[in-house]
Image: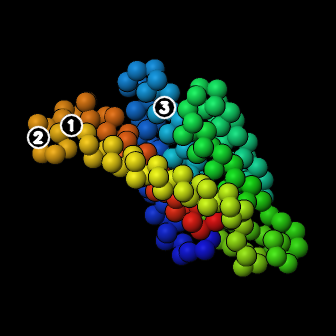
Amino acid sequence: MHGPPWVGWLLVLLCAGAGAYCLSSVRRGTAAQRHEARGEALMGLGMAAMAVPAPAVAQPSWTPWVFAAVFGAAGLWALLRRHPHHAVGAAAMVYMSLAMVPRPGGGPGGGTHAAHAVSMAQLGTADPGGLPVFTALLLAYYAVYVVAAGVRLAAVPGADGGAPVPVRAAWPEVVGACRVAMGIGMFAMLLTL
């Protein structure tokens, strides 16, 4: 981790809360909404697990491979279901998981890394993990996504002080807020990669 552990814990809380809400809403809405809620829940809870600071919990060396396998499968499923955002999110998680794999040696690119954002502390060398170009592309994607999703969220009926939206009708807006929160979390995790 390139930042203090409290940032990691804040990301854990943010992502776990968003993931738990999406998981609780899996039984509501249409089939498409339920499927989307499952994808968001997996992403949020996975991000929370990866954001746990390394000094707090010692993770086995095979943990990054498990994350990569789970999110690789989720990414393929998202592609088959034609959900490009979930596919990009899963690809970002696989990318960050693979950047967490311990590398032998002590020179540049070596040492034990915890390159996933706020998930693990940097234990070896001081050089960051990941490919700068790919990280920059993902950062740009999430920056645009968060701004666009936030604008869409601000334009919902009843948000301008008009007639209040009933709680049951507000469900898509809460899911949208969870997406914005998780997008911000992913952006923060990529920044510290």
- Rounded to the nearest angstrom, the CA distance separating label 1 from label 2 is 8 Å
- Which of marks 2 and 3 precedes in the sequence? 3
100 and 133: which is toward the camera: 133
Residue 181: x %, y % from top left:
42, 52
**Element type where label 1 sits in the image:** loop
**Element type where label 2 sits in the image:** loop
**Residue at point 43% right, 38% down?**
22
- Amino acid type shown at disc 1: Pro
Task: Spot the residue most to the top.
Answer: 31
- Which of marks 3 and 1 precedes in the sequence? 3
Q: Which mark is residue 157?
A: 1
- Amino acid type shown at disc 3: Glu
- Which of marks 2 and 1 precedes in the sequence? 1
Left or right of 154? Residue 56 is: right
Q: Which mark is residue 36?
A: 3
Q: Which mark is residue 190?
A: none
Residue at the spot of label 2: 162
From the image, which quarter does the C terminus lie in?
Answer: bottom right
Indicate which label's residue lies in the foreground, 1 or 3.
Answer: 1
**Residue at point 68% right, 61% down?**
133
The answer to whether residue 156 of the structure is visible from this angle is: yes
From the image, which quarter does the N terminus lie in?
Answer: bottom right
Indicate which label's residue lies in the foreground, 3 or 2.
Answer: 2
- Rounded to the nearest angstrom, the CA distance separating label 3 from label 2 is 29 Å
The answer to whether residue 17 of the structure is visible from this angle is: no
Residue 127: x %, y % from top left:
73, 76
- Rounded to the nearest angstrom, the CA distance separating label 1 from label 3 is 22 Å
